[in-house]
Amino acid sequence: MQVQADVERCQGHGRCALLAPDVFDVDDLGKVLVLRKEVGDELAGDVDEAVTSCPEAALGVSRG
C-alpha cells in the first residue's frame, strides 16, 4: 500500500497522526508529514481509518 498526502489541502486537524502515528505526523505548522510512504497489512487498517477520517480529504492510498 502506497500512502500519499496533499499538504496543500491539509488544514492541520491532526487526526491522521492520532489514528496512524507510525505512518503520519505533523510539522510545526500542524501540516501532515508522511513518515512511511509504503505500509504493509499490519498498518493498513490504521491508514484506512486515517484516510476516511480526514475532513479535508488530503490523504490517499494506492494498492497494488
Image (cartoon, rainbow, N blue to C red):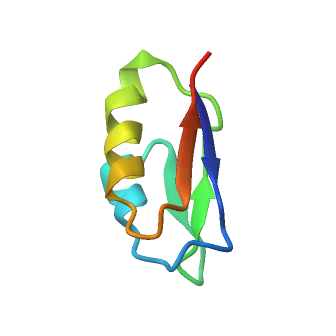
Give whichever of 36, 61 is nearer the camera: 61
Quadrant where the C terminus lies? Answer: top right
> From the viewer's perspective, is residue 41 above or below residue 34?
above
- Image position of 8 (left or right of 1): right
Examine the rendered structure and indicate whether residue 33 appears above or below residue 23.
below
Q: What residue is shown at x 31% (from left), y 44% (from top)? A: 49
> Which quarter of the rendered picture does the N terminus lie within?
top right
Q: Position of residue 13 (x, y in %)?
A: 40, 75
Q: Return the residue found at the far bottom.
A: 29
The answer to whether residue 43 is above or below residue 21 is: above
Q: Measured from the top left, where is residue 20 in percent x and y? A: 38, 46
Say if 16 sits above or below 13 in the image: above
Q: Residue at left 45%, top 42%?
A: 22
For the point 48% across and 61% down, the residue is 57
Please tell me in which quadrant of the rendered image residue 54 appears.
bottom left
Quadrant for residue 55, please give it.
Answer: bottom left
Q: Position of residue 62 (x, y in %)?
A: 60, 30
Residue placed at 56% from the left, 72% from the top?
Answer: 10
